[in-house]
Image (tube, rainbow, N blue to C red):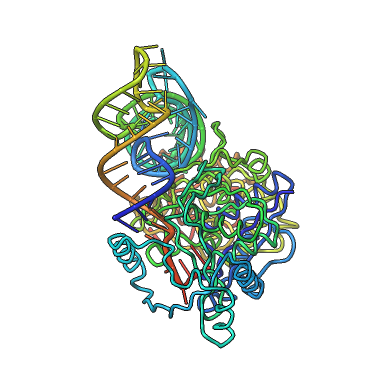
Amino acid sequence: MVRVRFAPSPTGYLHIGSARTALFNWLYARKLGGRFLLRIEDTDQQRSTEASTRSILEGLEWLGLDYDGEIVFQSANSPDHRAAALRLVEEGKAYRDFTPKEERSDANVKREIVERARRDASEGQDHRSNPYRDLPLEESNNRAAAGEPFAVRLKVAHEGRSHFEDAVYGAQERSYAEIEDLVLLRSDGHPLYNLSVVVDDVNMQITHVIRGQDHLTNTHKQALIYAALGARLPQFAHLPLILAPNKAKLSKRKHGEVVSLTTYRDRGFVPAAFRNFLALLGWSTGDEQEIMSLEELTRRFSLEAIVRANAVFNFSESDPRQWTDPKALWMNAEYIRTLPFAELLPMVRSELVAQRLWKQEYETTEREWFERTINLVRQRFHTLRDFSQQGRAYFADDFSMDEAAVQKNLRREPRLKELLPALATKLETVEPFTAETSEATLRAFVEETGVKSGLLINASRTALTGQAVGPSMFEVFEAVGRERSVKRLRDAVALI
RNA sequence: GGCGCAUUGGUGCAGCGGUCAGCACGCAGCCCUCUCAAGGCUGAGACACGAGUUCGAUUCUCGUAUGCGCUACCA
């Protein structure tokens, strides 16, 4: 049976790249009737937080990705990891390195790595030159027993090549000569990442490791650990990375909240829309279909169709209208306008509740009106927030007047001072008060007064909604209702 | 520095030896129209470069360039 896992570090918010990794793992598991497990890699005590773990769980839930079994907290397994390392020492597959720990400042690691590599190369230093590599086990045991600190390193063979088949990137090969005797256990006894992942993946019986491409080359090291442990290698599938517009790594420090999944929830994304968008970053069906439900994504998903090139997440810090990828925004609007009302309702409700615009009647006596109104306004909304922002005038009387709209549609024509109240009076007696009858009334009024219909229509729009744009005005009359329409037409005079 | 991976319009993807190089988002124009959307139509816009292989390369091979990743007693 297929068993996959999503293994985030709980350091900060859930990154959209991680979210996509989770999605792909989930899709793969669900497609094959397998298990989708969750492992929190909280071994970095300094940086891991409970709040972060919570936000990861919330994020998964928001995306609709449920996990199987209990959450595994990696820190709980470190005794296992340590035992595994020591067992490898006993078996001669790893050795204790008594070299004192080299201190390196975090800030310069990258540079130090490059410098050391250059130095080693020029000195012809090979990766098997550690003086403790061939220390007899007995002496090693004695020194350890005497309390001398040591790190544990894997013994990598002198000759040969490491191979594995990646489901996305194909056959991968690397010479052992390029791989150092990697540290499994730090001198303070803490297991290192590569060891921990492998031991946990073995224990969790993971069959497919689907993760970011940044792990591709390190997979050879992990393959060595699998071999030393005598465990079967899982199938690997590495995913292309999601990059910022300047093709750099997407990071919170540099790019801010666009990379955080919670941002999308908070800014009014429909989960299905964002999920759909994420699925299309680095994967496609091969045909022209882009809008897909979770069921459809599951049915059509395959590792073979994953793209190898990194994807650029296209947004613009300077343009608020493109605060995130325009296609994601488009897709969200697409979902908002096409989702069955019943599916949209809970999301609209919570938005209105949050903004104190919700009335219980919307689900009882005013249900019909509410549904018609939502269906009317959602046609031009992009996020769920719009229901309480641009849509406020439909649900409350204390909406704001857009100054530009007032200028353009009301103030430019002084005659509106008389026209609007007169129109209000006409509308007051119309029965029933619908889009059709309000239109007939307004058209008749136009005939009578000889003004242009557009003048009254646009003025009415601003009077009733505070805006210059919106749905067909006669539908707006009906949605706002007679009483409020009449009042707003009369109140608008004060603004002219 | 070494190793690895990648390279189709601004972005996301199709293409898998012969296509007018396709779709979506975005952009521009037109239609529709009471505004703005939606919708319809039209348009601008790409195979990184150089060698090979081949009757023929976007597609296969090699090289170059560029980008990204890894390289640590970080994860």
Residue under the image location 68 percent in, 50 percent down: A343
What residue appears at the point 33 percent right and 66 percent down from the top-left corner? A116
For this rendering, which residue is in front, A162 or A253? A162
Front in this rendered view, residue A274 or B26 = A274
Residue that sits furthest to the bottom in the current view: A146
The quadrant of the image that shows the C terminus of chain A is bottom left
A274 or A368, nearer to the observer: A274
The quadrant holding residue A41 is bottom right
- Position in image of residue A484 (x %, y %): 57, 57
Q: Is residue A108 left or right of residue A325?
A: left
Is residue A367 placed above or below A443 in the rendered structure?
Answer: below
- Please identify the quarter of the rendering in which residue A292 is found: top right
Q: Is residue A175 visible?
A: yes
Residue A399, position as x, y percentages in the image: 50, 63
Q: Count every numbered label the image shows and give the total.
A: 0
Q: A310 or A87, which lies in front?
A: A87
Q: Determine the image quadrant of residue A486.
A: bottom right
Q: Is residue A390 placed above or below A445 in the rendered structure? A: below
- Whether residue A429 appears in this view of the structure is no
Left/right of residue A195 with respect to residue A2 in the rendered view = left
> Percent x, y for residue B25?
45, 41
The residue at 51%/83% (across/down) is: A149
Judge whether A394 appears above or below B73 on screen: above
- Which residue is located at x 58 percent, y 83 percent? A142
Estimate the x, y position of residue A191 in percent, counting from the top left. Answer: 56, 72
